[in-house]
Image (tube, rainbow, N blue to C red):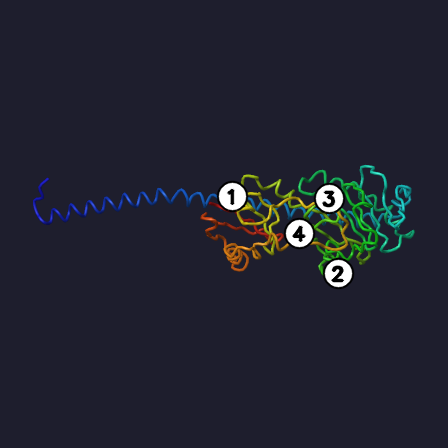
Amino acid sequence: MRMKSHNDRHKFCRIILRTIFIIATLAIMSACTPKNNNLDLERKNLINLTSKIEQEFLRIREEVKDLAATIVNIYADKDRLLAKSDKSLYALSSTGVLYKPIDDNGSAVFVSGHVPVNNEIRDIVSFTAAMDQKLRQLVTENPGIIQAYYNDKNSYNRIYPYFDVLNQYEPGMNIPSFNFYYLADEQHNPERKAVWVDEPYVDPAGRGWMVSAISPVYVDDKLEGVAGIDVTANSVAKQFLSDSDNLLLLDKDSTVISGNEKSIILLEMPSLVDHQYTSTVTANTYRKEDYSLLHSRSKIIRNAAQQIFKDNAKEVNIVLNDKNITIIIEQIKELKWRAIKLIY
């Protein structure tokens, strides 16, 4: 085609350039918009997930508060309950432990002997058997609850479901020295409310890594004991996390609480398996260094953890093993935990 003038050539060039710009813009938009839309969707899904977990933990804290109230009522009715109780259900071991040798579909009983067993303690054990129905109900009707229990000031533990306490517990245990007791006492919990032991610990009863909701039991203004409900990391994962999702739950110190194997390997951590606690326990035990993002061997991961936990970032982008990874983060305020999702 023959151009008629210099102006016509300029006009033609502007049209071509404009067309190229529009095509390039559309190409960029078509490439980026689905990714951005996908990220927005992932973020909405994560917010929805953390909201569900938050509501579940709030509900469990209310449940342990109700359990404590039930136990207070049992103490108020102790004379009547003691009159119809069966003390023959319990036996004293050679190590001075009072326990229930027969599984009668109720709770297990363990009085460690740290406070020598006397008639007063035997009476407390007998009349508090009335709480078995409530303990059983909590576990059987709530998939997230793995066990429910009562610990009293005399190192007496009543716990459901039943298990062999002599093979699992150490004689002479000072139960009030454990965090799942003392965090509810007057010094640590002056408001006398239901609280969380939000740092995962190894359960002395052998059921793996736990968090506990606990509530003090005051009778006549004196702390008699602490009611408790345990939730395992696995029970939370089974309820809310899919094996196919690249999701991790982190505690307040950046320790991995639960997550799928793929994500854990990607973050260069040891394989996460159930902790089978096969020996007796005499002190609290924590898993920290191996599964802490802030203490990762990878500088990239440590830097990402700094942004998440120190700067409260909601999104972090990293390159790890030649993978471009976007990490989105939401808080679970009830336990000061975080849920993160790896997108790549």
Measured in 3D between alpha carbons, the distance from the residue under mark 1 to the one under mark 4, in whole angstroms, is: 25 Å
Q: Of the residues shown, which amino acid type is indicated by label 1?
A: Asn
3 and 4 marks in contact (CB < 8 Å): no
Please tell me which of labels 3 and 1 falls first in the chain. Answer: 1
Which residue position is annotated with label 4? 200
Disc 4 to disc 2, C-alpha distance? 22 Å
At a point 88% along the width and 44% down the height, the residue shown is 90
Return the disc, 2 or 3, that comes first in the chain's sequence.
3
In which quarter of the view is residue 284 placed? Answer: bottom right
Q: Secondary structure at mark 3?
A: strand
Name the kind of residue labelled 2 in the image.
Glu
Q: CA distance from mark 3 to mark 4?
A: 15 Å
Q: Nearer the viewer, residue 271 or 94?
A: 271
Q: Where is mark 1, residue-wise?
A: 45
Q: Secondary structure at mark 4?
A: strand
- For marks 1 and 2, the one nearer the N-term is 1
> Which mark's residue is nearer the viewer, 1 or 2?
1
- In the picture, the disc for residue 186 is 2
Q: Which residue is mark 3?
A: 147
